[in-house]
Image (cartoon, rainbow, N blue to C red):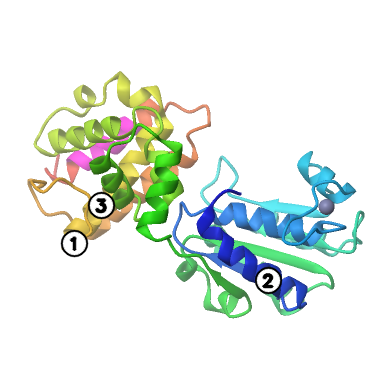
Amino acid sequence: MNLPWLEEPQRRLEQTLQANRLGHAPLICGPAGLGKLELARWLLARILCLSPAGEAPCGQCRSCELLASGSHPDSFRLAIPEDKKEIPVDDVRGMIASLQLTPRVGPNRVGLIEPAEAMNRNAANALLKTLEEPAEKAWLILVSHQPGRLPATIRSRCQKIVIRPPHADQASAWLVDRHPSIEGADLDRVLTLAAGAPLAASALLAGDGLDHGRQILEGLLAVAAGGSASAVADDSWHASPELTWHWLSVWMAAIMRHAQGLPDSALPATFKLPAELEPQSLARLWEQSLAGRRMSTMAVRHDLLIGKWLLEWARCFSPGT
Ligand SMILES: [Zn+2]
């Protein structure tokens, strides 16, 4: 995986596996951008591998080969469908049915749900029955960035594996290795923006990185001060909708922290909005930016969606328009 902060949790999981103490529903949770999905994929491969070598899936058995080619018949994966905002109940029912089939390759079957908090209420209820009466030799790995949004009944039936952000030194070293030209002040800034999560920080450095992010923040301030949304969102905003949505979500999260008076804000020291915003408005804009990012590979008019988002942002400062 080459994510050094995951080595310790991986070792502990391996020991749990070897002692036959891994529950049938591990819940890997922690902030986004730490590589939880990587760890979950490793665990899935490790459970399915026919001849695991120490901590690693062997990479050579039929199971490992099928996984590598993406066609393992005993491995099931659920995520938010591209055209939806949540994981629908039918998808969960489909996975549960698959987990009850006779395994085709080895003795085990594994399902993976990420992000688990995206299951709607019906989907979570459907899953609950399976968690109460698990099929034999079937594992269900849940990955969650916000386990608090999962029903308590689900959480209590899972074996919680909490992943925490690494020490700042380890995060910095990893980041410098991947982005050798980054300067010290920017390194601190981007780690703060990403709340210490190295993969999230690395994603912020994609494209024009921090320059693009600064430009978007300036645009937000200009619109808040009464500037025209269509003039602010120029071609650079539309060149990579994914990055733009990502930065919008990062700034909304930072502005929410700022509004609560939290000290870890990564905003410039002089940052000030022309009006105080309702927490609900900020949260809604933040949710919409996350949804925009999820849709970033879809063939939709992101220029229109981003324009609409900016108009809503503008309305926060001049209600009634
Ligand atoms: Zn193997």
Q: Residue at x 16, y 63 (%)?
A: 261
Q: Are marks 2 and 1 in contact (CB under 8 Å)?
A: no
* Type of the residue with mark 2: Ala
Residue position marked by numbered label 2 in the rendering: 25
Q: In the rendered image, which quarter contains the C terminus?
A: top left
Marks 2/1: CA–CA distance: 37 Å
Task: Mark 3 or mark 2: name the one nearer the start of the chain.
Answer: 2
**30 vs 58: above or below:** below
Residues shaded magenta? 306-314
Q: Which residue is mark 3?
A: 254
Position of residue 149 measured from the top left corner of the image (x, y, whole percent):
47, 67
Q: Secondary structure at mark 3?
A: helix
- Give me the disc on residue 263: 1
Left or right side of 302 for 47: right
Q: Residue at x 52, y 27 (%)?
A: 299
Viewer-side label of 3, 1: 1
Asked if residue 305 is among those painted magenta in the image, a careful observer would answer: no
The quadrant where residue 148 appears: bottom left
Mark closest to the chain's N terminus, 2 or 1: 2
- Per the model, the C-alpha gap separating discs 3 and 2 is 33 Å
Instruction: Please tell me which residue is depicted at 54% across the width and 53% down the height of the picture.
Output: 86
Is 280 placed above or below 182 here?
Answer: below
Look at the image and tell me whether residue 301 can be seen: yes
